[in-house]
Amino acid sequence: MIDVATLAKKIRLKIVTLCFQKKTSHVGGALSVADILAVLYGKVLDISPARIKDPSRDRLFYSKGHACTALYAALDLKGFFEPNALSEGFTTDGSYFTSHINHQLPGVELSTGSLGHALGVACGVSLAAKRRQQPQSIFAVLSDGELDEGSNWEAIMFAAHHHLDNLIAIIDYNKIQSFGSVQEVIGLEPLADKFKAFNWDVTEVDGHCLEQLVSTLSQAKANRSGKPKCVIAHTVKGKGVSFMENKLAWHYKSPNDIDFQAACLEIEAS
């Protein structure tokens, strides 16, 4: 079994490889969420390729659909796809491996990329699970920029009103969105206080500390206190590749030959 640190490294290598080979974007946001996905799929989620239709499985709604390479990589490394299917099919005409996450693929719960939708869907699934007295946990991974969307705040109110304590929202708070820093575009602070005011349990973590992530997400999953949970994961856009870190350009750029070789060397040496 791959340990979480190795899984995170392999996810990062696959992200930069896919973005290089297919000349696609969003490498920065994919790298920022890599550790979160490694912990979810390596330690926390009760899901496997053999159980993708099991009604009692945990659910992950990945709202960062534009950063599809991170989730595709995690699912591929955990055996959800046939060998070579991702590398051969990604962005190929007619393939389900589209440049925003696609629910036609095994292990993907919802097609996303039009931001602000996944949390509302996760709320509905969480409510249904509670009413059916099913034990699973429902996770939603959100980008920080998409919290500009009002639909998220409707879902946040809904979740608290219905005491959805089987719901865990994880914010990939890398503080850079498509046209600038989050603070410049629409500031979110005090973000933790906002969720608390909406009657959520809130924890802030270093989104690149695997030990913190394992402990926090495991506790959030076990805690059924009557409130939905929000984990604000402070991350770095482009994490793991020094020349991509905290650079807005890597929201859009794809690596060239030199970038790719340098990125792989740095990730492998980490």
Image: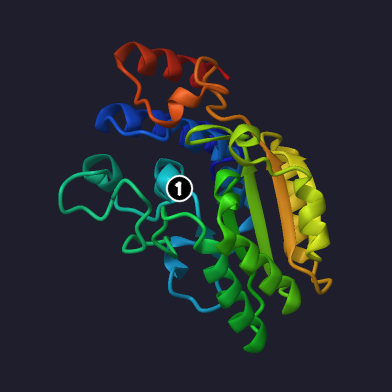
At horizontal 39% and vertical 60% (from top left) the residue drawn is 111
Within 10 Å of the Cα at label 1, are there few (<14), some (14-19), or many (20+) other Cα atoms?
A: many
- Would you name the residue on which mark 1 appears? 71
Q: Is residue 38 above or below residue 256?
A: below
Q: Quadrant of residue 181?
A: top right
Q: Is residue 177 above or below residue 83?
A: above
Q: Is residue 47 visible?
A: no
Q: Is residue 259 above or below residue 81?
A: above
Q: Where residue 227 sits in the image (x, y, percent)?
A: 79, 70
Q: Is residue 99 visible?
A: yes
Q: Where residue 125 sits in the image (x, y, percent)?
A: 56, 76
At horizontal 67% and vertical 65% (from top left) the residue drawn is 156
The quadrant of the image that shows the N terminus is: top right
- Lateral position of residue 212 relative to residue 106, left or right: right
Q: Is residue 256 above or below residue 85?
A: above
At horizontal 55% and vertical 24% (from top left) the residue drawn is 240
Q: Where residue 35 sits in the image (x, y, percent)?
A: 60, 39
